Image: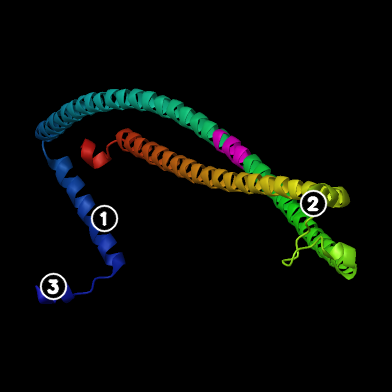
Amino acid sequence: MEQACNIKVPTKKLKKFEKEYQSLRETQLQQEDPIDRYQRENRRLQEASMRLEQENDDLAHELVTSKIALRNDLDQAEDKADVLNKELLNTKQRLVETEDQKKKHEEETAQLKEVFRRELEKAESEIKKTTAIIAEYKQICSQLSTRLEKQQAVTKEELDVVKSKVMACERCREVFSKEGPLQVPAVSKDNRDSDLDEEKDSLKAQLREMELELAQTKLQLVEAKCRIQELEHQRGVLMNEIQAAKNSWFSKTLGSLKTSTSNQLPPSPKEGL
């Protein structure tokens, strides 16, 4: 076998041997009885025909089975497509509704921000006005206090001068007692100092009125500060509620979209098989 395998035959010789074999085979077939040859050929053709018919039956059965399976798969795919289309329409409708709700929330938030901004501006303007009024009242009170002190000093100096002149007179000296108060009737003193007393009284009245207005202004300032703090607290609460509502809406929408997507995914080819 090794020697036979190791023999190297040229291609030309192989073709020549093939031709010789074919010619020898044809010669043998021609020498054979035609009836036997035809019978053998007929049996071979019958066997080939039976084999082909069996293969045809197998292929027809496989084709019918494949058509039935494909039809069932097609029906299931159409049913799933209808369900997915309905879910897609529902999801789109929910998405439109959520977008409308989001727009409404944004509009409400913008309105609330505008209201808070106006309230803050109004409160700031009131605080500025109140601060200016308080500063003005303080200045007026300071001026009145200075004027009153000056007037009291001038009046005291005038009284000292009058007293010194009276004490210099021997006849008028008896009018004063040892402690120094004037013993004449009070009418004479009132007549001399009526203008000064009236001015003092008016200044004191004005000072009391300004002190009362200052107290009222301080009270209004405190109330304005309390109102600003309350508005800021309300604003913080509303912003927290709006943020919580946005987070809740976003999580619900995301969950519904994930659920819809997971339900809409068709089975893989392996799962179908």
Residue denoted by label 2 = 200
Q: State the quadrant of the N terminus.
A: bottom left
How far apart are the two marked residues, 3 and 1, measured between alpha carbons?
21 Å
Q: Residues within 10 Å of mark 3 (few under 14, many from 20)?
A: few
User: Relative to 141, is 116 above or below?
Assistant: above
How far apart are the two marked residues, 2 and 3, measured between alpha carbons?
153 Å
The circle on residue 19 is: 1
User: Relative to 27, is 164 above or below?
Assistant: below
Q: Position of residue 212 (x, y in %)?
A: 67, 45
Q: Earlier in the sequence, mark 2 or mark 3?
A: 3
Q: Nearer the viewer, residue 93 or 230?
A: 230
Q: Residues within 10 Å of mark 2 (few under 14, many from 20)?
A: some
Q: Nearer the viewer, residue 192 or 124?
A: 192
Left or right relative to 27: residue 230: right
The circle on residue 4 is: 3
Q: What residue is at 89 percent from the left and 67 percent from the top?
A: 170
> Secondary structure beneath disc 3?
helix
Could you tell me if the residues under marks 2 and 1 are in contact, i.e. CB atoms within 8 Å? no
Q: Per the image, is 193 magenta?
A: no
Left or right relative to 161: residue 246: left
Q: Residues within 10 Å of mark 1 (few under 14, many from 20)?
A: few
Q: What residue is at 32 percent from the left and 36 percent from the top?
A: 259
User: What's drawn in magenta, residue-wise?
Assistant: 108-116
Q: In front: mark 2 or mark 1?
A: 2
